[in-house]
Amino acid sequence: MSQIDLPFEVGRTIEARSFELGFRGAWFRCKITKIFNKGRALFYDLEYLDFTEEGIHTTKVFQKRLAENENILMVRPIRPRQSHENEEGCGGEEEEEEEVVVVHGLWKVGDLVDWWKDDCYWSGTVLEVREEVETVKIELVPEPYGEGKSYDAMFKDLVPSLEWSLEDGWIVPFSKVGEKRQCAKLMKLPNEAEETREEEKQRPTKKLAVEEEEKLRPTKKLVGDEDLALNIMESESIEAAVMDLEEQIVRIEWIKEMLLLNSDNSTWIYEDYPPPSS
């Protein structure tokens, strides 16, 4: 399979799986630094973001386990943002942009989870839930695809296991025990980053509109008021007097512009005299 079939490019942050002894089945956050082919095989040079001392690591993108015929994809996008059903913004909005994984309440026996431990994700199955201390016992994926063994894990370090493929994108696998259950669901919600970028795009336009409004305020006041309201009438402070002076300067400038604009049709002549010397 060639690179054109995968949505990854140099510089992108992804997750990469390892089959090295001691790390089998673990997913690491990486940045792609190089994409190349050797024969018919596709390779990525990866920089491990949480293990910078490891240097650049070359990964074969499609691998087979011993005595297996199936090609296994060793990379995937960064997992979607996580939310919970009781949080705001988890309803079904019409404008769908960002994919979010929404967790259903507490973990249950049989749930497939990823455990954040030692700066990487380990996939496993929940064997036991201890709500009173907010911990579970999980069994990691068995050999040859994982390290196996059982461990205690905190609720806060668990996220739902997800599977990704080029054809189907992200999916939530079903529980392996009891009822056909999924511990989470994937939803589309408005993309906050996109909304922020759109607001930033509109900000210069809004700023110009505000500036135009500020310019028109003295005009509106002159046209609409029979008497000019002065700040000094409400307060005898120096600040009020300064504000009145500034407003008068703005009005004079506006009158000056009006005289200059209509000078062709008027007998008035505007001359800008220098201030008298003291």
Image: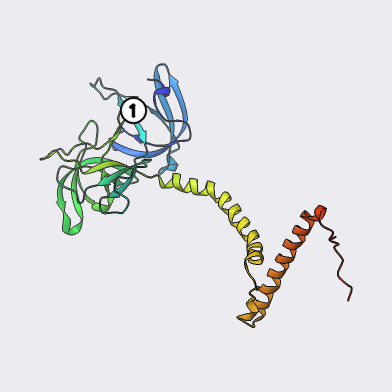
Of 73 and 25, the residue lying toward us = 73
Q: Which residue is mark 1?
A: 166
Q: The C terminus appears in which quarter of the rendering?
A: bottom right
Quadrant of the rendered image containing residue 51: top left
Write the residue at 67% across / 80% down: 238
Q: Is residue 268 above or below residue 200?
A: below
Q: Residue furthest bottom?
A: 236
Of 175 and 258, the residue lying toward us = 258
Of 179 and 149, the residue lying toward us = 179
- Secondary structure of the residue carrying numbered label 1: loop
In the rendered view, does 22 fall on the left or right side of 267?
left
Q: Which colour assignment does the render follow?
A: rainbow
What is the x, y in percent for residue 119?
Answer: 35, 46
What is the x, y in percent for residue 35?
Answer: 46, 27
Q: Residue furthest top?
A: 39
Q: The N terminus appears in which quarter of the rendering?
A: top left
Write the residue at 46% across / 30% down: 9
What is the x, y in percent for residue 62?
Answer: 34, 25
Q: Is residue 72 above or below residue 85?
A: above
Bin the neighbour count of mark 1 within 10 Å (Cα to Cα): few under 14, some 14-19, many 20 and up.
few
Write the residue at 52% across / 49% down: 200
Query: Mark 1 belongs to which amino acid?
Result: Leu
Q: Is residue 52 above or below residue 1?
A: below
- Count of marks overlaid on the render: 1
What is the x, y in percent for residue 56?
Answer: 45, 34
